[in-house]
Amino acid sequence: MGLKVASIPSLCIAIVSITIGFFHLLSYYDKGRNEKLHLSFFQVCLAISGFLLISAGLYNSDSVAEGSVWQRYQFLFASIIATTFFIFIFHLVRKEVSVRTIFTIVLIYIPVGLAATFTDYATKPLHPAIKHIDALNITYYEAELGNIIVIYSILLFGGMLYSLYLLLNNYRRGATDLFGIIIAIVIFFIFSTNDILIGAGIYTSLYLMEYGFFIVLLSMAHLLHKRFILFYRSTEEKARNLENIIEEQTIELKRALQRAEKSDRAKTSFVSTMSHEIRTPLNGIFGMTELLLKTDLNEEQKEFMGTIRLSMDHLLQIINDILDFTRITENKIVLESTPLDLEKFLFQTINTFKTQADSKEIAMNLRLQRDLPRFILGDEVRLRQVLINLIGNALKFTPQHGQITIEVTRSEEHEDFHLQFVVSDTGIGITESQLNKLFRPFTQAHEGIERTFGGTGLGLAISARLVQAMGGEIWVTSKPGEGSRFSFTISSGAADTQPEIEEPTDINNHGIADANLAEHMPLEILVVDDSDINIKIALRIFEFLGYAIECARDGNEAISKSLAKHYDIIFMDIHMPNTNGISATKSILNQSRNSIKPVIVAMTADVIEENRDVYTQAGMSDFIAKPFQTDDFKKILFRWGQK
């Protein structure tokens, strides 16, 4: 087989090849090593560069022996080129190339190249020659074909034809960007045939195989460049589409958020309105019941009125539970962290159940771990709410002569300071299947309990959410017929300061009778409410306390009266026609001619905590929730009347 090589073009093409390959290797790593086509192209460029550098060495051979050595290495690199090129073609027409395919290609071409390189079967060394063409000043090495080279040529051309078949198939399926590489392979096929015919002595001409390599190399680079541009444009288009989708989704999310906020506001408004509308008539029932209980009644009438009062308390608790649950589910509960006298707090909480426990002859025990700090940090109101729910349930489900125990210890399962509270009873107990329902809203253990003991099923659900908000968890163990054990933890800590001691609000602590209160604490009082029933109740309550109060039916009348006369305390309803309580409060405080402004107390059935901030910002000093009772007014009088 005669081979002719021009040294300088071979070196130039080799340098161009390795440079192009290097850039595609960088592209392979830049794309996260996902595009195997770039790696395969780099391997082809590396093999072609090696072949061309060997060819340059063959061109510079000064002897037949030296040329024979260079030609042997040409065969090895030619087989490597064939292997890497066919792997590149498979990557081109298929997304993935299996290891079996790669192994098969290597097994076909590499052994032939090795045999041609390291044995004497490639050429017949008896007939080699160094030939020179004077007209073109070209020197080349020539040798007759050996059997192994014939086999190699058959495999090479067979592989090229199979590559053309694969490429044409994909071209017909729509891969029109393969046209350039198909033409390049055809040209390389023609150039290779030309070199074989020249080597066989059929005719004399220039050897063109190296230039065929260059054409194929350029076509491969051009193809990858086109695909990269298409990929870039496609990616850019997808990015634009993605931006449009994100923008549309953002707009939709904003609309959904606005709808959710609107729904949330509507829900809050509905709850607030319903609370107001239910509490307003309840205020009339509570007030009249309390006033009636202060009259002369026989024992039977007192019993009837006591039953009415208990029923109203139960109804009010249901309303409060629903309101609390709504606020908790909307994450509108704000917890406080203030110093708390733990032992005093527990005794006060337990004492609220003393009458109920005594009536059922149930023993109530308190056990405190000895080394607990006396003063802790926590939300007294919410902690008491949880304990009242658990102790109330224990009393409800514990029969007469039973026992309830409240234990408080430090939780050993937490690294930071956690308190563990346990409320255990000797009641009816809960089955395993019923335990899973306990902390679900509006459910109880089973229908039988619901019918026997009543309740909304919200108490434990509220308690669970409050405990979670306080950084703890709640769980229960129980055995039917033996009792239940409810446990919960809260995140706490020892308080550095003692809690502030509130002034007593029960007037009996001052040795003052209700009827003589006005003598010891003379005050000018104005009650503002648009409800005739509420006005009547307030008049009777203050009359009972010894006060002759004045009344106003709306905000405008309250403003007019406050301009004409100074009042020490104004009890202001919020929801009123014409001018509401908020606007009236601002006007009264702004227009007050006296340096000592009146104390204005919100008096409303709207008990949403967020609204209390509105009342404070308007200038109100305190708050009374409807339905109000005599003690509510007495507390306000003692809190503000002496200042």
Image: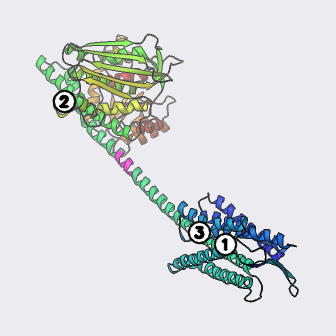
Which numbered mark, 3 or 2, is in the foreground of this view? 3
Q: Is residue 401 above or below residue 189?
A: above
106 left or right, relative to 136: left
Disc 3 to disc 1, C-alpha distance: 43 Å
472 left or right, relative to 221: left
230 left or right, relative to 477: right
Which numbered mark, 3 or 1, is in the foreground of this view? 1
Which secondary structure class fits the magenta region best? Answer: helix
Disc 1 target residue: 148
Q: Amino acid at mark 2?
A: Ile
Q: Residues within 10 Å of mark 2 (few under 14, many from 20)?
A: few
Contact between marks 3 and 2 (CB within 8 A): the answer is no
Q: Mark 3 or 2 closer to N-term?
A: 3
Disc 3 to disc 2, C-alpha distance: 68 Å
Q: Is residue 263 magenta?
A: yes
Question: What is the span of residues highlighted in magenta in the rendered image?
Answer: 261-267
Q: Amino acid at mark 1?
A: Ile
Q: Amino acid at mark 3?
A: Phe
Q: Which mark is residue 427?
A: none
- Which quadrant would the N terminus be assigned to in this image? bottom right
- Hey, which quadrant is residue 206 in on the image? bottom right
Q: Residues within 10 Å of mark 3 (few under 14, many from 20)?
A: few
* Whole-percent x, y for residue 69 in the image: 79, 68
Q: Residue at x 59, y 69 (%)?
A: 231
Disc 2 target residue: 449
Secondary structure of the residue carrying numbered label 3 = helix
Q: Is residue 52 magenta?
A: no
* Whole-percent x, y for residue 92 in the image: 58, 70
Secondary structure of the residue carrying numbered label 2 = helix
Q: How many marks?
A: 3
Disc 1 to disc 2, C-alpha distance: 96 Å
Disc 3 target residue: 231
